[in-house]
Amino acid sequence: MTKPEKILIVEDDPDTATMLSAYFEAQGYKALTVSWGNDALKLVQENVPDLIIQDIRLPDMDGYQVVSELRKNTRTSHTPIIFLTERKGQDDKIAALELGAVDYITKPFDMQELSLRVRNALRRASYASLVNPVTGLPDQQVTESRLQEWLDQGHWAVILVSIAGLEAFSEAYGFVAGDDVLRAISLIISNVVDDAGTREDLIGHADRASFVLLTQEDKAQDIRERLASRLEKAFPYFYPVQAVESGQNPAPMRAQVGVVLASSGRYDSPRAVLNAAMRARRTLVATPRPNR
């Protein structure tokens, strides 16, 4: 049975909070209510909602401060937020949208309209959750679903590209630098596919640090060789110049590639194929040499 989606209502007016809670509970959602901004920030640490309905005027802090803190938290940085407020000024609305709010509704409001906007925001969020937020590529669920379709067609190839040591690199040089690595690798793979693959090829994720390329069997060897060449040239540029030149890199990364072909055996599930690709991985690129 699917769990109901959770809506956090941050509203200091008890009548409005009760009305909203009762309405959304009747619609099949799980409604949580708090009247203080600090209570909202504490609650999301334990119970991350699927959507937040946020008032601006609160007893302890304004709603802008609450949302600003929520956006700093990795767990709630992409949670859809709808402002529901008495403030009708254009500057207020712009301030809310600049914080990443998905909608801004002023009181008095129509409950049916609010319900539709909540439903639409949740639907958009569910679509967004199917792609990696850093690279924009399909996540594991989408990748495996597409691979399942390919299993019955034959002549497929799966190329798994893993970046070993990415977490240590991110801790040493910052998570922004780690995200830059992921974006760069995804671009390299995309360029290789543009040059040597087909329009039907798919690039997705097996996990955060692993990319999956679905292509045709007769394209796999060429693509693998091109990936090896381009990754070897790119890897030194991920590191600070001092780390490369000194040879004292505290967080070495390695690019590992595994290839599985349709002709290499029978696989009864996408997971079996990905596991085989993981076992077949070989290191293509190790700690960069001081070549700049």
Image (cartoon, rainbow, N blue to C red):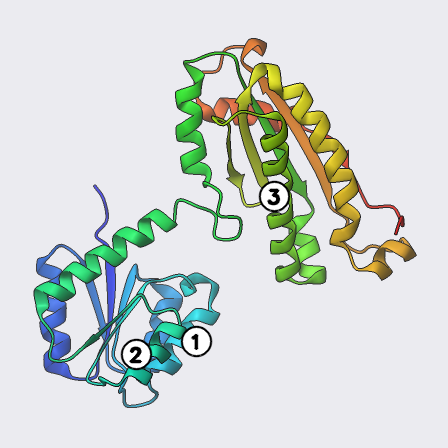
Q: As shown in the figure, which amino acid type bears the numbered disc 3?
A: Leu
| Among the 4 quarters of the image, the one containing residue 178 | bottom right
Residue under label 3: 187
Please state the horizontal and vertical placement of residue 32, each as a whole percent of the image. 22, 68
How far apart, in angstroms, are the residues tagged by discs 1 and 3? 32 Å
Left or right, 150 with reference to 292: left
Residue under label 1: 69
Under circle 2, the secondary element is helix
Left or right, 145 with reference to 188: left
Q: Earlier in the sequence, mark 2 or mark 3?
A: 2
Please state the horizontal and vertical placement of residue 92, each as a whole percent of the image. 31, 83
Q: Nearer the viewer, residue 144 or 225?
A: 225
State the mark number for residue 77.
none
Looking at the image, residue 160 lies above or below residue 51: above
Under circle 3, the secondary element is helix
Residue at 32% from the left image edge and 49% from the top image edge: 126
Residue at 81% from the left image edge and 45% from the top image edge: 287
Residue at 40% from the left image edge and 61% from the top image edge: 78
Q: As shown in the figure, which amino acid type bears the numbered disc 1?
A: Glu
